[in-house]
Structures are given as structure tokens and as C-alpha cells.
Image: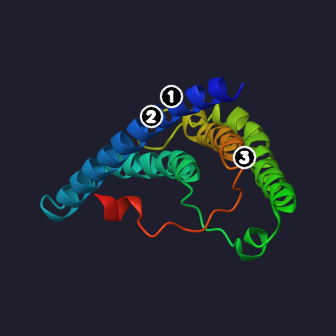
Amino acid sequence: MRNALERVCLALRGLASVIVVLLFAVMLVAVLVQVAGRYLFNFPIAPAAEIATFSQIWLVLLGAGVAVARGQHVAIDVLPSQLPLPAARVALIGITLVSATFLAVLGYGAWPLMRLGQFQTSPSLRIPMIYMYACLPVGAAYMIVELLLSVIQRWNDPFPPPSVETEEEAV
């Protein structure tokens, strides 16, 4: 079970990371086109603004899942890190359950919005808004999967001390 979940998560991580990078590139180009249109040609390019906005929304929700995978979300774990192993495991499960419950409510609450989005189109691009609203349940589901995997991976050391070297410093 653990190996299968890890393989699925690794595939999802790779896919999410590639999508996040592509979304960032699309957003960057759209903002540059928008700025060039506005200041060089004195003509606002509305589709560029919409593309940048939609890319950023998807980027944030998928990027949050990537951050969960890397353990980069803000966490206050001073108290849980002082607990003995059995109590630390209970705390890990409790924190994960609260987080997963919030994400499940977020995903579930997005369904009425998505149903409404079937009949709405974006003002400039004229694409169905369901594609934009879908980022909520997709991002929430991805974060839940990463949370479950983190419980499995951190079971023997639920709240490890922070490492001295971060990924950015290693590069």
C-alpha cells in the first residue's frame, strides 16, 4: 500500500511541478504582453489579463500541493516536537485530519460553484468558468493525497527538527 501510494504521489508531484512551471511561464508572458500593450501601444489587452489571472489561480492551488509535498508550509510544531513518539503520532494524525477536513470542505463547497460555472463564460476569453472553478477541488484533492503520504513518510519521526540546509541553499 505504501509503495503504491508513494509511486502515485511521485507521478502526481512530477506532473504538478511541470504544470506549475508552465503556468508560471504562461502567466509571465501574459503579464508582459499586457504591460507592452498598455504602455507601448496604449491599448489594454484584456485576454492577457484574464490569462494571467487564471494561470495564477491554478498556480496557487497546485503550487500549494507542491509545497505540502516539500514540507514548505508554515507550521508551528514546537509543542508536538517535544512529545514522546506515540503522542507525536497522535498529534500528526490530528493535525492531518483537521487539514484534510478543511480541504475536503473546500473541495465539496466548490461543486455548486462549478455547476454554476457550466453556464458562465469568462468575459474576455469566453471559456466556461467551470475550468477555472475546477482548481478548487483538484488542488484540494492533490493536497489531501500529499498530506496522507506525509503521514506515512513521517510516521517514525513525526516532527523532525528543521534541516540547516534548504533546497535553495543546496543549488
Crowd tier of the residue under label 3, counting other residues whose Cα lies within 10 Å: few below 14, some 14–19, many 20 or above: some
Q: Is residue 29 above or below residue 14?
A: below
Identify the residue shown where x is 78% and y is 44%: 104
Image location of residue 72, percent across then percent down: 54, 60
Q: Nearer the viewer, residue 12 or 44?
A: 12
> Is residue 41 something one can see in this rendering?
yes
For the residues labelled 1 and 3, say whether their Cβ atoms are less than 8 Å apart. Answer: no
Give residue 27's mark: none
* Residues marked 1 and 2 touching at CB (< 8 Å): yes
Which residue is rendered at x = 76% and y = 54% of the image? 99
Q: Residue at x 39, y 58 (%)?
A: 167
Residue 128 image point, x, y percent: 54, 32
The answer to whether residue 43 of the structure is visible from this angle is no
The spot of residue 50 in percent (x, y) is 41, 48
Which residue is under mark 3?
A: 151
Q: Nearer the viewer, mark 3 or mark 2?
A: 3
Point 68% across, 50% down: residue: 154
Question: How far, Cα to Cα, is label 3 from label 2?
Answer: 20 Å
The image's colouring method is: rainbow
Q: Nearer the viewer, mark 1 or mark 3?
A: 3
Q: Which residue has dot 1 on it?
A: 11
Looking at the image, residue 15 sits to the left or right of residue 116; the answer is left
Tag 2 or tag 3, which sits nearer the N-term? 2
> Taking 34 as reference, is 99 left or right?
right
Distance from Cα at disc 1 to Cα at disc 3: 18 Å
The amino acid type found where label 3 is placed reads Val
Q: Earlier in the sequence, mark 1 or mark 3?
A: 1
- For label 3, the SS is helix
Q: Amino acid at mark 2?
A: Gly
The secondary element bearing badge 1 is classed as: helix
